[in-house]
Image (spheres, grey):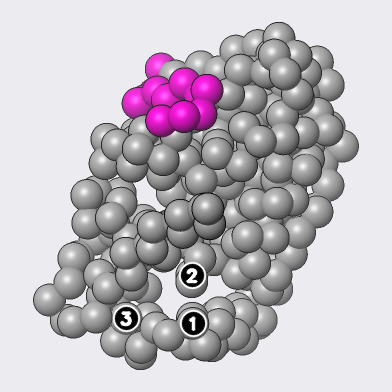
Amino acid sequence: MRPAAPPEKPADDLYQTGQGPGRFEFNEPVARVFDDMLERSVPLYRECLHATVGWAARHARPGSRVYDLGCSTGTLLAALAQKLPEGVRLVGVDNSPAMLKKAREKLQDTPAELIEADLAGEFQPSEASVVVLNYTLQFLPPNRRGALLEKIHRGLEPGGLLLLIEKITAQNPEHDETLTALYHDYKRERGYTELEIARKREALENVLIPLPPEENRALIAGAGFRAVELFFRWNNFAGFVALK
């Protein structure tokens, strides 16, 4: 018998009219289309997901926890569950009930703990060999990012791995206009209209605040991490790994 095809992702149609949502929030309408939004809006999303799983699988230790902070609908958690060593406890954390509802549906047969928590609040990871922070830190005010990275550092075991992917700005501001234009070209090629691109950009204004790569590197090092390495770069997106 041929296996059933996976259900189609609802298309990201949030900004197809001028009457779409205003300020971007991780609410029910966004959760409904988020998987399609990631596939079409985040350059090399699948490749970065596979790279994340590869790094995590090589650093995860039996008896420890592997955290996905800002786990959204649980796609990475599902992939990690297929590759991590036995005895690793998988934990997803998000502050959006709508996202966690989607994650529970996706992960109902996956041994992962899901926690609703504000990462900038009292939440503290512990006994972790790996912490993933993909496309999440960028949504915190810049003056609160260092404190979260310090909490992650405290919660990691010696030698533990931090993996972080962010949208970034150019180190040299003269290149920012080109980086933005290339990113908008990328979105057009994936079916987004001029109106959708403009409305999404407006919705994310002062919600998603990217930093230059060297500022991200300095934040990571300032939280106590060592061996900070750039492992991925696509125009205005970058990925870093670091060790405790």
Q: Are marks 3 and 2 in contact (CB under 8 Å)?
A: no
Numbered disc in front, either 2 or 1: 1
**Quarter placement of the C terminus:** top right
Q: What segment carries the magenta color?
A: 108-122
Amino acid on which disc 3 is placed: Glu
Is residue 16 or residue 111 the one in the foreground?
111
Q: Are marks 2 and 1 in contact (CB under 8 Å)?
A: yes
Is residue 72 or residue 164 the one in the foreground?
72
User: Taking 172 as reference, is 121 above or below it?
Assistant: above
Give the class, few, some or many, for how many residues have Cα within 10 Å of label 3's Cα (few <14, many ≥20): many
Give the class, few, some or many, for how many residues have Cα within 10 Å of label 1's Cα (few <14, many ≥20): few
Residue farthest to the right? 227
Q: The residue tagged with tag 2: helix, strand or loop?
A: helix
Q: Quadrant of residue 204?
A: bottom left
Q: The residue tagged with tag 3: helix, strand or loop?
A: helix
Distance from label 1 to label 3 (Cα)? 12 Å
Residue at the disc numbered 1 = 190
Q: How many numbered marks appear?
A: 3
Numbered disc in front, either 1 or 3: 1
Q: Is residue 239 visible?
A: yes
Magenta residues: mostly which secondary structure?
loop
Q: Is residue 180 magenta?
A: no
Residue at the disc numbered 3 = 196
Residue at the disc numbered 2 = 41
* Marked residue nearer the N-terminal end (2 or 1): 2
Identify the residue shown where x is 41% and y is 40%.
106
Amino acid on which disc 2 is placed: Ser
Amino acid on which disc 1 is placed: Arg
Is residue 28 or residue 152 the one in the foreground?
28
Q: Is residue 148 visible?
A: no
